[in-house]
Image (tube, helix red, strand yellow):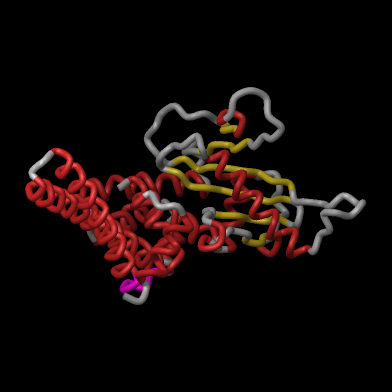
């Protein structure tokens, strides 16, 4: 449940800050001193090739070939974000090097945009560190370090503060109305009335509605299939266990039932999301989150069941 709620808000996050005017507002929230920056100074460098790399990030922005901002939205706090950011940064630099045709083996130093890494935390946890470091994840002194600054609501009313408020309103309406169209409608209505992302939501209400409806529908499907997989595993395990009549048989039956039920759940999720015109890379990510598959295994399952 937490994963899908995060996906709903992250999808709005990505869509919001892909718009040039809001890309600029985001940058100015982080660098208010650079008032001369123009919308044309920004280039989106978000990683999207999940089927190949197994990773994609929420938002990557290149500023005038001198700065790369990687920004993640997170409602469930994770100290592992520093490691994920390292992978995102490596992928972003790889694409930059290929695009600029830089010679890594030459005698002259290549020039890279300076990285800044941020996570926007929208959850309820009161105490979170201001900075997350890669070195927090290993013992002793290492040769590599990554620092990620944690951002949260600060009462400034800037675009980041409004996004955090949007997330809290979305959570409140979801708790009140569940996974329903009313929850989505009330989220948008409340935000506009409270001047939270109001111009964005008013001008792009149709697009935001489509994002939220699609992801709410996916969460409903996930809940149904979680239930069905567990039910199938229990029934199959009990039946096989009764037929064997022994403790060993019951254990084996339960294991077989869980395996078969899980596979059926994977097949059904692929089929239903495909029917909803969800892209393959999004289905791969869903299988990774929902069933704990490795990205490569999830990609193989999508290919296996895509035409069935």
At 39% across and 39% down in the image, what residue appears? Answer: 123
Question: In the drawing, does residue 302 fall left or right of residue 233?
Answer: right
* Residue drawn 58% across the image and 42% down it: 118
Main secondary structure type of the part rendered in magenta: loop
Residue situated furthest top in the rendering:
140
Stretch of the chain drawn in magenta: 274-278
Q: Is residue 185 visible?
A: no
Q: Quadrant of the C terminus?
A: bottom left
Using the image as rendered, state which of residue 23 and residue 139 is in the foreground: 139
Residue 30 appears in which quarter of the rendering? top right
Q: Residue at x 51, y 38 (%)?
A: 80
Whether residue 275 is in magenta: the answer is: yes
Would residue 190 be visible to someone looking at this image?
A: yes
Give residue 156's position: percent from left, percent from top: 51, 40
Nearer to the camera, 149 or 111 = 111
Residue 90 sits above or below residue 308 on the image: above
Q: Residue lying furthest bottom in this view?
A: 307
User: On the rendered structure, is 75 left or right of 56?
Assistant: left
Q: Is residue 63 magenta?
A: no
Residue 196 % position (x, y): 42, 51
Q: Is residue 206 above or below residue 135?
A: below
Vertical position of residue 221 compared to residue 76: above or below: below
Lateral position of residue 232 relative to residue 143, left or right: left
How many circles with numbers are drawn on the protein?
0
Residue depicted at x 65% and y 55% = 92
**Can you give x and y, in whole percent of width and height, for residue 175 in the image?**
24, 46
Measured as percent of width and height from the top left, residue 75 is found at 41, 42
């Amino acid at each position: 449940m937490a994963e899908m709620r995060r996906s709903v808000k992250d999808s709005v996050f990505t869509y919001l800050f892909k718009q040039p005017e809001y890309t600029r507002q985001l940058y100015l929230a982080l660098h208010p001193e650079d008032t001369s920056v123009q919308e044309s100074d920004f280039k989106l460098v978000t990683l999207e090739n999940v089927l190949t790399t197994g990773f994609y990030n929420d938002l990557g922005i290149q500023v005038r070939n001198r700065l790369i901002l990687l920004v993640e939205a997170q409602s469930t706090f994770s100290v592992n974000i520093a490691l994920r950011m390292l992978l995102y940064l490596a992928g972003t630099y790889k694409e930059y090097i290929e695009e600029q045709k830089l010679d890594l083996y030459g005698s002259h130093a290549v020039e890279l945009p300076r990285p800044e890494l941020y996570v926007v935390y929208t959850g309820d946890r009161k105490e979170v560190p201001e900075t997350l470091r890669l070195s927090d994840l290993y013992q002793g002194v290492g040769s590599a370090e990554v620092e990620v600054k944690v951002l949260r609501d600060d009462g400034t009313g800037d675009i980041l503060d409004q996004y955090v408020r949007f997330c809290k309103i979305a959570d409140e309406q979801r708790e009140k109305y569940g996974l329903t169209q009313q929850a989505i409608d009330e989220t948008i209505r409340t935000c506009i009335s409270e001047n939270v992302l109001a111009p964005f939501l008013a001008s792009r209400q149709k697009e935001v509605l489509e994002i939220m409806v699609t992801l709410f529908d996916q969460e409903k499907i996930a809940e149904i299939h979680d239930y069905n997989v567990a039910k199938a595993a229990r029934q199959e395990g009990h039946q096989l266990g009764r037929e064997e009549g022994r403790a060993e048989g019951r254990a084996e039956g339960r294991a077989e039932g869980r395996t078969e039920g899980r596979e059926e759940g994977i097949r059904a999720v692929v089929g239903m999301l495909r029917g909803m015109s969800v892209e393959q890379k999004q289905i791969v990510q869903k299988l990774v989150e929902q069933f704990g598959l490795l990205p490569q295994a999830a990609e193989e399952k999508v290919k296996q069941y895509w035409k069935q």
